[in-house]
Amino acid sequence: MKTFICSSLVCLVWLTAASVRAQDVIPVAPPPPPNVLVAPTLRPAQTTASTPAPGATPEAETEFDDHDTVRVSTNLITVPAEVMDRSGRYIGNLRKQDFRVFENGVEQDLAYFASVEQPFTVALLLDVSGSTKTRLQAIRSAANAFIKGLRPNDRLLLVSFDGKINVLTEAVTLNDLRKKKLRLDALNDGTLLYDTVSFVLNQRLAGIPGRRAIVLLTDGVDGGSKKGSYKQTLRDVEEADVVIYTVQYNTLPDLPARLSQIMNPKARAHTQARMLKEYAVGSTYLEALARKTGGRLQKAESLADVPQAFAAITEELGRQYSLGYYPKGQVQAGEKRDIKVRTRSANFVVRARQSYVAAAPASRNGGQD
């Protein structure tokens, strides 16, 4: 989203429950990368992932501990899956043995299974570029509604972006998040959409164990990204074990007001054609992010529709299974592999990730990341 505001304008938005008082925060120790503004963060909660019993194998129906999850992350292929009956009603009581997973037509042995009760670490990415104070208030309200819809054992990583990437808090539990008011300060020209997706995917979520998701609120228009790109981020998500949900809110109604500031008719027509093309590219990009990772694209005609879109996403996150397997046979790095998930009941319909791109293999016997 393009920004057409004076750089001296300072807008504040508070993300908190009104009834909770502020607490002291712990500053972030490591320096942020360029173009990344890091707000003070809360103390991350200790992970509650259980450690497998002695002698347990990956085939055991239990979560891996943190060390194992990170160590095998480039071998273990994890597939988020949602199951419904033929009438569209959600099925939530399935077990590992109820699923079958095929890669390039070959049935795989399930080595990992997480039921719908297992928590997520969710990265909520908020595009605030070009926002007025009124729009920031609407984004704040929508974000609060989303946070309230998460489950108590979920964790949240909160990031906003305009011409800079603003890390509002690292991944924390909801109880910790609600102890502190978080704010967005001055707005910056630009919209680092691709940079933000790349940064969160590769520098924030990459080292977090367990189930992970990105929820991205934006109109889809990038402006000024240097490190990330359209093609590169789409390649990255095909290799990542992260499900992405995108919410595209419509900023086209703002276009006439922006164009009215251009006096030259030819320049105005050229700018209009360029911006319409950018919006079309943005729509394609957001749809691809969701489709390639097993997520979903939600459309919002205005910011007033965003809370409803967020509610649909939190509901879906709460009913997702996660299935994992080690691919049989030789897989070449960079090779695209097709995935098909089925249940043993023909009466159920599965919506799941359909493919991935193989990353460089890691050792399953204690290799390093």
Image (tube, rainbow, N blue to C red):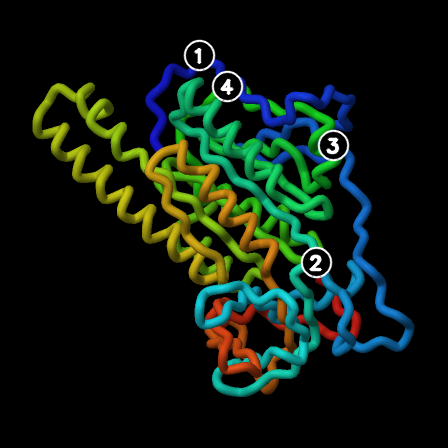
Q: Residue at x 56, y 79 (%)?
A: 343
The label on residue 186 is: 4
The mark tally for this picture is 4
**Numbered label attached to residue 234:** none
Of residues 224 and 197, the one nearer the viewer is 197
State the residue position of label 2.
Answer: 118
9 to 57, vertically: above or below: above
Name the element at disc 3: loop
Mark before the other along the chain sequence, 2 or 4: 2
What residue is disc 1 on? Answer: 8
Disc on the earlier residue, 1 or 2: 1
Residue 356 can be seen, yes or no: no
Q: Please state which of residues 364 and 127 is positioned toward the viewer in this rendering.
A: 127
- Label 4 element class: strand
Where is the N terminus found, in terms of image quarters? top left
What is the quadrant of residue 324 in the picture? Answer: bottom right
